[in-house]
Image (cartoon, rainbow, N blue to C red):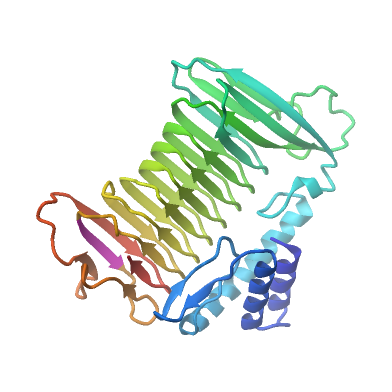
């Protein structure tokens, strides 16, 4: 979180500015940094979000009082988290060890691991307070590039190996080497280049920083972080569990069988990403699932204080969605009534004209509050 945003939140907490003034200032700071602001779509009287990343979102006049309460609830926690992070030197979404006063020294390390193309490995990458990037490689090796930040501690050996790499017939393990030093002594930003081969499992875990994954094929994928985003591109995965807090999860040009996403206070977006089963949970943001394909069988989405958008244009099978939390003032449903119909007695949205040629049905359970459910 930038110093400007922290200052705005402090002013709001101290009563020096109103909620409306704080929201305008936060949007102004975002726009100054090239971020798009959240704006209502006045033509359809619905919420439409055009933001990539934000801390507190603006809202239409209809929801102003509810959003005001929401802002007050998160201000104290946001300030506490940001201030503690600055005092302790920990990494939060916009903090970098490049600017750290504790970790004054910087060096780089490169390690390479030979793989057997005929084996299906488990790839495990652990980190703390720094990012993990898993990217495609043109070689047959796994290449590990570490950017190491460390203190002036005199007893750090000159040739200390800051990164552990281990490989056997089944597993590849990459993580910082804290056998002799601690997290207070150093941190490592990890970029791992992976050859084009199938993996049994890919697990990447860090905290207070981002995880990026590109062009990975695996049976199971587990990504876990906090206070920063998860990004996935051009990957093929059977089972996947993605978890973060206070930042977004964005996936594009990928393919999943089972996909579970959990975050808070930030958006979830899928673009051109076929799946069979999707379960996505967030709060105080939006969920936007573009390009849903006929492969989809089940969709579960929960949100609060924000809209949910499902694009079903490419789905020819029958659709049956249970919509929860509907309210004509704070949580309306918006859909094409030529294609779908709503049973107002049980809030069930179904295909208007059943496709008798299709034996399959897309089932869904969609819930939000203070934002519309949009079926496109």
Task: Identify whether 235 is placed above or below 271.
Answer: above
Task: Identify whether 141 is placed above or below 75.
Answer: above
Q: In front: 124, or 179?
A: 124
Q: What x and y, as percent, mark residue 58? A: 55, 75
Q: In front: 64, or 311?
A: 311
Residue depicted at x 45% and y 17%: 119
Residue depicted at x 44% and y 45%: 253
Q: What x and y, as percent, mark residue 64? A: 51, 82
Give the quarter of the figure containing the C terminus: bottom left
Q: Residue furthest left?
A: 356
Residue depicted at x 46% and y 40%: 234
Judged left or right of residue 93, residue 257 is left
Q: What x and y, as percent, mark residue 47? A: 45, 74
Task: Identify whether 282 is placed above or below 102.
Answer: below
Q: Is residue 319 magenta?
A: yes
Judged left or right of residue 89, residue 374 is left
Q: In which quarter of the image is residue 306?
A: bottom left
Q: Is residue 231 magenta?
A: no
Report the magenta residues as a range.
318-323
Q: In which quarter of the image is residue 23?
A: bottom right
Residue depicted at x 63% and y 70%: 75
Task: Identify whether 57 is placed above or below 147.
Answer: below
Give the main secondary structure, helix, strand or loop, of the magenta stretch.
strand
Q: In front: 186, or 215?
A: 215
Give the quarter of the figure containing the N terminus: bottom right
Q: In which quarter of the image is residue 38?
A: bottom right
Judged left or right of residue 338, residue 110 is right
Q: What x and y, as percent, mark residue 32? A: 70, 68
């Amino acid at each position: 979180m930038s110093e400007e945003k922290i200052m705005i939140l402090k002013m709001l907490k101290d009563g020096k500015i109103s909620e409306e003034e704080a929201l305008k200032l936060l949007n102004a700071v975002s726009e100054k940094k090239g971020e798009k602001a959240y704006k209502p779509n006045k033509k359809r009287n619905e919420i439409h979000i055009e933001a990539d990343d934000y801390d507190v979102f603006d809202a239409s006049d209809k929801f102003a009082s509810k959003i005001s309460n929401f802002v007050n609830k998160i201000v104290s926690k946001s300030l506490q988290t940001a201030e503690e992070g600055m005092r302790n030197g920990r990494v939060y979404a916009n903090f970098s060890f490049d600017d750290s006063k504790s970790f004054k020294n910087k060096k780089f390390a490169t390690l390479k691991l030979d793989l057997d193309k005929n084996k299906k490995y488990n790839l495990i990458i652990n980190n703390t307070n720094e990012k993990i990037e898993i990217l495609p490689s043109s070689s047959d090796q796994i290449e590990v590039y570490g950017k190491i930040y460390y203190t002036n501690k005199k007893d750090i050996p000159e040739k200390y190996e800051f990164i552990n790499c281990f490989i056997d017939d089944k597993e590849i393990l990459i993580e910082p080497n804290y056998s002799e030093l601690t997290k207070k002594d150093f941190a490592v930003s990890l970029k791992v280049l992976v050859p084009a081969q199938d993996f049994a499992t890919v697990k990447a875990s860090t905290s207070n920083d981002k995880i990026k994954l590109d062009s990975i094929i695996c049976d199971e994928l587990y990504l876990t972080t906090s206070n920063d985003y998860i990004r996935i591109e051009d990957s093929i995965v059977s089972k996947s569990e993605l978890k973060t807090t206070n930042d977004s999860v964005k996936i594009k040009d990928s393919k999943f069988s089972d996909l579970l996403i959990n975050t808070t206070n930030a958006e979830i977006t899928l673009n051109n990403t076929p799946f069979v089963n999707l379960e996505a949970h967030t709060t105080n943001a939006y969920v936007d699932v573009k390009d849903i394909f006929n492969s989809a069988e089940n969709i579960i989405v929960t949100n609060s204080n924000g809209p949910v958008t499902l694009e079903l244009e490419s789905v020819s099978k029958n659709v049956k969605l249970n919509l929860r939390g509907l309210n004509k003032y704070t949580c309306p449903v918006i859909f094409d009534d030529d294609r779908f119909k709503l049973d107002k007695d049980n809030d069930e949205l179904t295909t208007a004209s059943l496709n008798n040629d299709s034996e399959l049905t897309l089932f869904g359970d969609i819930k939000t509050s203070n934002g519309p459910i949009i079926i496109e």
